[in-house]
Image: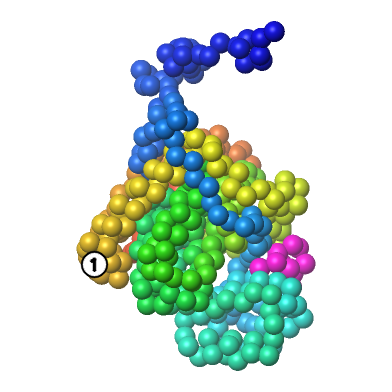
Amino acid sequence: MKKLFEEFETPSIPKWKGLLVKELKSLDGNDPLSYTDEIEGINIHGNYDTLNSQIIKLQNQTNDWQIGVEINVVSCDLANKKALQLLNTGANALNFDLRNTKDLNLSKLLESIGVEFIYLYFTTNNSIQEQQLTDWFSDKTPLFSQINSNQNSVNTFEINAIGGNATQELSYALAKGKELLSKNSKGTLHFTFGIGNNFLIEIAKFRAFHLLWDKLTTVYKSSIKTTITAKTGFVNKSLKDPFTNILRQTTEGLSAVLAGIDQLIIQPYDAFSEQGSTDFTERIAINISLILKEESEIDKLIDPFSGSLSVENYTEFLCDSSWKLFQEIEKIGGIENELALEFLTSSVSRIRKKRMEEVKSNKKTLVGINKFSNPDTSKLKWKQEMEGFFGMEKLILERILITESTENNE
């Protein structure tokens, strides 16, 4: 009696290629087993050999994550009301931005909030607020509380938001993180990453960061604790086709949590519209995390892509490419050196332009943005001004196309 797999022919590589060419019909002479992504700079062959592939295993102890929301605090009373509303809809991590707060009253801000049951993050820009927070929590035992400042947080989300790729985001995280690590190797360091729309690449990006950051902390013999937040952005979001955003946000959030993060923030897709987010879009954003956790039980799986040869390949590629870019930044003088910043800015600007060119030429299809337009016209409009990074405003491809179309019609 034959064993099960003896009854099936093991196809050769040429036969696989022949079948792919026949089925896909539109390869234009390209190798069907090769994958090229000009944005990410990746050119990988799809014929994986288990004997030559490196299997990476992350050392995470859990895959649970916090369901985060962001609250810009102008009025402590209004921010408290919003926080209670978001907690009641499923969030368990509050990220308070205090940089626009002129009169910080923590008793009002945290009134009726059970700090012993939720995760708290505070972003400040002055030592007075930091001292207020330290004093207020001195006689309390919150579940988790972190004060983010320029001394202990790295915001690589901004690289993603202006159009940078995974390699650039990782190299900036390493360069900035290394700079802070060299000044203080204890305490907690908070990294905030953006999430792109390339599913496998994003999984590999977060896996690569775990590996590279472990490498750096080992070199510095550091016991610093690291918190990783992943946050969806707006580069590929649409106000004209709102429900497609839910699909995009779900796959983006899924890619991040599959690779092991501490906090996931799904931003409401209309947060940067002129009208701002609504209770509905805020609720949907939280529900995505709830579905991934409570219904899909992704929080029970630790590094499920270990051994997936395609993801292992991407992880290895991003480790190599981002480490090389990080070394180039270091050779110029480090991320705080003006020449290094100019070098990285130029690199990100080139990828940003390529993203815009691909969408404008329809080389890259974004449903509802440059293809398959939604017949139901939305009244929502993107904000006119977008704060950015490296002298570039946030990249929202739909906004760019609308702006150019309006100018051409005029």
Question: Left or right: 239 with respect to 217?
Answer: right
Between 315 and 166, the one nearer to me in the picture: 315
Q: Measuring 66% from the left and 15% from the top, which residue is drawn there?
A: 4
Between 339 and 371, the one nearer to me in the picture: 339
Quarter location, residue 154: bottom left
Q: State whether residue 279 is above or below residue 52.
A: below
Between 107 and 93, the one nearer to me in the picture: 93
Residue 181 % position (x, y): 40, 72
Question: Left or right: 33 with respect to 200?
Answer: left
Question: Left or right: 326 with respect to 161?
Answer: left
Residue 25 % position (x, y): 46, 16
Residue 388 % position (x, y): 41, 64
Q: Measuring 44% from the left and 35% from the top, which residue is drawn there?
A: 53
Range drawn in magenta = 84-93
Q: State whether residue 212 is above or below residue 202.
A: below
Q: Measuring 49% from the left and 35% from the top, which residue is drawn there?
A: 309
What residue is shown with label 1?
A: 333
Residue 377 showing in the rendered view: no
Q: Which colour style is shown?
A: rainbow
Name the image quarter holding the N terminus: top right
Quarter location, residue 217: bottom left
